[in-house]
Image (tube, rainbow, N blue to C red):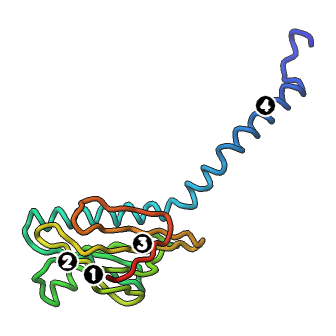
Amino acid sequence: MPDNEKGYTLIELIVVVVLLGIFFSFTAPRFRDAVLTDDMKSATLRLMGKVQELRSDAVRKQIDHYLKFDLEKNEFWHEYTDVTAEGSELAHDTHVEYLPRGIRFTDIWIRGNGKVMSGETAIRFTKKGYARQSAIHLESEDGQECTVIVNPFLPNVEVIEKYIEFEDM
């Protein structure tokens, strides 16, 4: 090629296209998984944070706390032990959080209470920071399932990326 002509040869372009193809073949599945599971991760992180917050608040304030769920509306909020009906409505209105679009509660299992598949239920956190073992089951529109496990005595919340069945003992 003469010195005054600038450009790329066909071989150089083919090499670049092949390298880009190889690069995208490795990154596309990870990117796809990150995009598709982003709402599920967001929902589980929010639930984990709320559980940890209520557990520590219950110990710090020495008041039982409740994490309440409305399974039809896919919403959750928190309340304290001694609230009136008006206070309960106010707690709902000021503290309500919704699951991301496309994510829903499948059911919530609480040891001793069993599985709740519709309506409202609550997980109680005592002033000592204890809670009954619970499993919050989530499902996305694309069929992905997730279980958020609240341990009775441990402060950590466990997330398992599938539906885990618990039996009432």
Pointers 3 and 2 in contact (CB under 8 A)? no
On screen, residue 11 versus residue 57, left or right, reads: right
Residue closer to the observer: 47 or 130 = 130
Q: Which amino acid, by three-letter code, is at mark 4? A: Val
Q: Which amino acid, by three-letter code, is at mark 1? A: Ala
- Using the image, tell me which numbered label, if any, was put on residue 99: 3
Mark-to-mark CA distance, 3 and 2? 18 Å
Mark-to-mark CA distance, 4 and 1? 57 Å
Q: State which quadrant residue 116 falls in.
A: bottom left
Mark-to-mark CA distance, 2 and 1? 10 Å
The quarter of the picture where the N terminus appears is top right
Residue closer to the observer: 122 or 161 = 161
Residue pictured at 17% horizontal, 74% vertical: 65
The quarter of the picture where the C terminus appears is bottom left
Mark-to-mark CA distance, 3 and 4? 43 Å
Q: Is residue 158 positioned above or below 17 on the image?
A: below
Residue 61 position, x and y percent, is: 8, 66
The residue beneath circle 2 is 79
Q: Is residue 114 positioned above or below 55 on the image?
A: below
* Label 3: element kind: loop
Pointers 3 and 4 in contact (CB under 8 A)? no
* Label 1: element kind: strand
Q: Is residue 98 positioned above or below 155 on the image?
A: below
